[in-house]
Amino acid sequence: MSTVELKEFLKAKIDEIENNSFLIYIKNILNNKIDDLIILTSKQKASIAKGQFEYSEGNFKNNDFVNEEIEKWLKE
């Protein structure tokens, strides 16, 4: 596909899009601002929510503890 054909294809596809959020996403990509916009899947959102809940319940280990455990395992 040539550059001209690719541009025409993309223009046609963009013209078909009715979803404003998706158009904004495309605009951000074209403006090189993709780092400002993070789109997560439902599964990713659920995983983050689960992690936040576990943290709020105190169900985590701090970095020092984990490093000590790793050192023990490496010595075995």
Image (tube, rainbow, N blue to C red):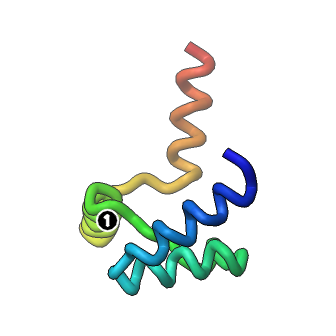
At a point 31% along the width and 65% down the height, the residue shown is 45
Q: Quadrant of residue 53?
A: bottom left
The answer to whether residue 22 of the structure is visible from this angle is: yes
The local secondary structure at tag 1 comes to helix
For label 1, count other residues whose C-alpha is less than 10 Å away and answer few (under 14), some (14-19) or many (20+).
few
Which residue is the extreme one toward the top? 76
In the rendered view, tell whether residue 11 sits above or below residue 50. below
Q: Residue 8: percent from the left, percent from the top? A: 61, 65
The answer to whether residue 58 of the structure is visible from this angle is: no
The C terminus: image quadrant: top right
Q: Residue 27: percent from the left, percent from the top? A: 59, 81
At a point 67% along the width and 75% down the height, the residue shown is 30
- Name the residue carrying label 1: 45
Q: Quadrant of residue 9?
A: bottom right
Who is closer to the viewer here, 23 or 46?
A: 23
Amino acid under disc 1: Lys
Who is closer to the viewer here, 35 or 22?
A: 22
